[in-house]
């Protein structure tokens, strides 16, 4: 009986990850939500807290939620229970950054939290492409005076190298595989700012090779190709 229940939990969890992945590729919040609901039914599975945090994080981004207090509280608790999980820490840092963008005065206290989370994550997970990419996103998205384009470029470039190596691996369903398209898109935008338009095209095309449905890169690439000055 126990073995059957364990097998059912395992199946639910893997189905949940699969549904989340489909929703992530399509940028479909409803599909991601269905995946999260299945993951929540398998809380004892290894990696369940991680994948629940990933799903909640992307639901906030997909729905462009303002504040996202419930998700932040949930991920704060996950970080407390898993202080060495660098990717979860960086997701929390990005969500704090979104709160600062919404209301810049929050930077007075959230800025210190972001700095602490980012520093710890880069020590415990320097070889994770998602840690490097999210660190770059923090520097890229942060409003003045908290942002830094050069640091964003450094972390995103490192992330791109790590993502490229990761693509050659044969993953199982529970192995993380997300964030590369956003990394390449941000690198493309940085290249446009620097006037390096062929490099920008390269990064947008790299994002579309991973996910042909990724609309932000397709839109940016069309804008570059349609502008005669570029």
Image (cartoon, rainbow, N blue to C red):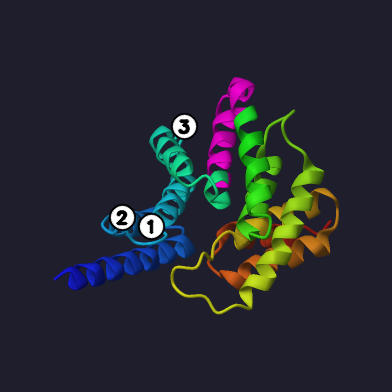
Q: Is residue 29 left or right of residue 118?
A: left
Q: Which mark is residue 48?
A: 1
Tell me whether circle 2 and circle 1 mark residues in contact (CB < 8 Å): yes
Residue matched to label 3? 67
Q: Is residue 126 left or right of residue 72?
A: right
Image quadrant where one finds the C terminus: bottom right
The stretch in magenta equals 90-110
**Would you say residue 45 sits in the magenta stretch?**
no
How far, Cα to Cα, is label 3 from label 2? 26 Å
> Within the image, what quadrant is residue 51 found in?
bottom left
Q: Residue at x 64, y 28 (%)?
A: 112
Q: Nearer the viewer, mark 3 or mark 1?
A: 1
SS at mark 3 in the image: loop
SS at mark 1 in the image: helix
> Within the image, what quadrant is residue 157 found in?
bottom right
Q: Residue at x 61, y 61 (%)?
A: 181
- Number of other residues with Cα within 10 Å of mark 3, as a class: few under 14, some 14 to 19, many 20 or more: some
Residue matched to label 2? 43
SS at mark 2 in the image: loop
How far, Cα to Cα, is label 3 from label 1? 24 Å
């Amino acid at each position: 009986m126990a073995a059957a229940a364990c097998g059912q939990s395992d199946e639910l969890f893997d189905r949940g990850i699969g549904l989340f992945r489909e929703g992530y590729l399509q940028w479909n919040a409803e599909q991601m939500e269905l995946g999260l609901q299945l993951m929540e039914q398998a809380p004892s599975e290894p990696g369940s807290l991680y994948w629940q945090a990933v799903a909640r994080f992307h639901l906030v981004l997909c729905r462009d939620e303002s504040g996202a207090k419930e998700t932040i509280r949930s991920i704060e608790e996950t970080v407390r229970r898993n202080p060495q999980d660098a990717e979860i820490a960086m997701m929390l840092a990005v969500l704090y950054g979104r709160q600062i963008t919404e209301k810049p005065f929050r930077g007075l206290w959230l800025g210190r939290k972001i700095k602490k989370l980012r520093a710890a994550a880069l020590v415990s997970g320097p070889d994770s492409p998602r840690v490097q990419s999210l660190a770059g996103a923090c520097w890229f998205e942060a409003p003045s005076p908290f942002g830094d384009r050069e640091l964003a470029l450094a972390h995103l470039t490192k992330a791109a190298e790590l993502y490229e190596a990761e693509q050659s691996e044969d993953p199982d369903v529970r192995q993380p595989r997300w964030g590369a398209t956003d990394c390449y898109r941000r690198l493309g935008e940085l290249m446009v700012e620097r006037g390096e338009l062929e490099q920008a095209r390269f990064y947008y095309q790299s994002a579309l090779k991973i996910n042909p449905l990724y609309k932000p890169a397709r839109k940016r690439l069309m804008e570059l190709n349609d502008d005669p000055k570029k």
